[in-house]
Image (cartoon, rainbow, N blue to C red):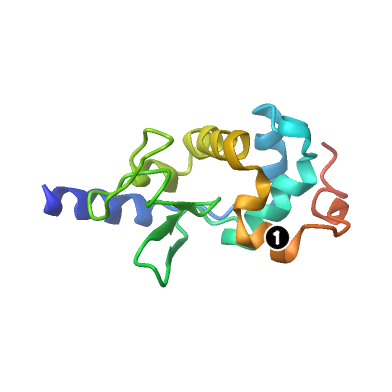
Amino acid sequence: MMKVWVLLLLVTVASAKTFTHCELARILKESWMSSYAGLNLANWVCLANAESEYKTNAINHNKDGSTDYGIFQINNRWWCSDGQFSSHNGCQISCSQLMTDNISDAIQCAKTIVSQQGISAWVGWNNHCKNKDVSQYIADCEV
């Protein structure tokens, strides 16, 4: 089973995409994120920039042994399952689903996280977006 998961992860990573900020803004707007939980679209784009630089294949290994996956850097301890780490799997999703070019699963999981913990659940948002003028992230996007 572990070999299958590693192979699936490698295939997923090989097909990774890096969005432009405007591409991401359009997708997020189409996914009703422009005012989800009272957050404007620029906050979501800033979050994705801070966490993954808009890369669907981003992976970050944390000091506590957990791993963050995908464009929103969703953690396997709480929100997704990667088969390697005991997880609460709050989004009921495989972590590999967060690393595809189709980010609809990642968006749905991000909505779940925000509905339960708010956007401050993301360290990247706290450090780079909170209390800042984030309008620059979508200013030239016509969204």
Residue nearest the viewer, comparing 86 with 94:
86
Q: Position of residue 32 (x, y in %)?
A: 69, 27
Q: Is residue 29 above or below residue 131?
A: above
Q: Residue at x 21, y 55 (%)?
A: 6
Residue nearest the viewer, comparing 118 with 103:
118
Q: Residue at x 64, y 62 (%)?
A: 124
Residue nearest the viewer, comparing 64 with 28:
64
Q: Is residue 34 visible?
A: no
**Which image quadrant for residue 97?**
top left
Q: Is residue 16 left or right of residue 121?
A: left
Q: Secondary structure at mark 1?
A: helix
Q: Amino acid at mark 1?
A: Asn
Which quarter of the rendered picture does the C terminus lie within? top right
Q: Position of residue 110 (x, y in %)?
A: 56, 40
Q: Position of residue 70 (x, y in %)?
A: 47, 52
Q: Position of residue 108 (x, y in %)?
A: 53, 32
Q: Residue at x 47, y 60 (%)?
A: 58
The residue where tag 1 is placed is 126
Q: Residue at x 67, y 53 (%)?
A: 47
Q: Residue lying farthest bottom? A: 63
Q: Is residue 15 visible?
A: yes
**Category of crowding for the residue at label 1, using alpha-carbon neighbours closer than 10 angstroms: few (below 14), some (14–19), many (at least 20):** some
Q: Is residue 100 left or right of residue 132?
A: left
